[in-house]
Amino acid sequence: MLNTYRTYEENELLSLMAQDDKAAFTELYDRFWKKLFVIAFNRIKDKQSAEDIVHDVFASLWNNRTQVNIDQLENYLAVAVRYSVFSTIKKKSRAKQIEQNVSLSSIVEMPVETSLHYKKILELVKTEVEHLPEKCRIIFKYSRDAGMPVKEIARQLHLSPKTVENQLGKAIRQLKLATRSLLQSFFTLMW
């Protein structure tokens, strides 16, 4: 049956996809994935980021399958990839700028008391991370300690990206609750 989809026009496949036909979506994915990957990779020069961008564009196409009205699918997908590339570049640039600002601000010496509070907060966070449920703790450590993106964690642990995001949110909420009073006293001392 899947082979018959190869003969279908794009508009027929889009129509079938809008009716939740996964095989039609798979055919569109197979037709355009490589071209879109090349577009993303040529601009971003990072294989993993290019794959993530193309995956996100197709995920968005599937998630919005009943609402989209597309005349020329290849152009639509190419523009979506370019937009995602620019957005990714902008995010990376912003992250690099924040990282530089943080490293510059760390050069400024902290008063001894502030430094002690900072160390205490870090110790408390480490302790609280160890008290998280196992899956939540592993996901949090992959994200924060290893710097792995959500999709990579999901692949590594055989989970959906949404599950990973939910577990990260749960971990952050628990850590915020556990460290709230200590953080309030820390920021009071800084001002």
Image (tube, rainbow, N blue to C red):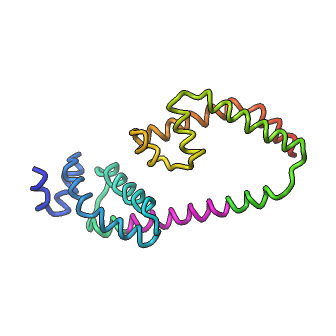
Q: Nearer the viewer, residue 83 or 18?
A: 83
| Vertical side of 121 occupied by 4: above or below | below
Q: Is residue 96 magenta?
A: yes
Among all residues in the image, which is located at the extreme bottom?
Answer: 42
In this rendering, the answer to whether 172 lies above or below 99 is above
Measuring 44% from the left and 37% from the top, which residue is drawn there? 163
* Residue 20 left/right relative to 136: left
Q: Residue at x 86, y 50 (%)?
A: 110
Name the spot of residue 5 as percent of width and height, x first. Answer: 13, 56
Q: Position of residue 122 (x, y in %)?
A: 73, 39
Drawn side of residue 109 relative to residue 48, left or right: right
Residue 104: quarter of image: bottom right
Left or right, 13 with reference to 91: left
Q: What residue do we see at 30% from left, 65% from top? A: 34
Magenta residue span: 79-98
Our reading of the magenta stretch's main secondary structure is helix
- 174 lies above or below 151: above
Residue placed most toward the observer, 120 or 22: 120
On the image, the x and y values in percent for residue 179 come to: 72, 33
90 is within the stretch colored magenta: yes
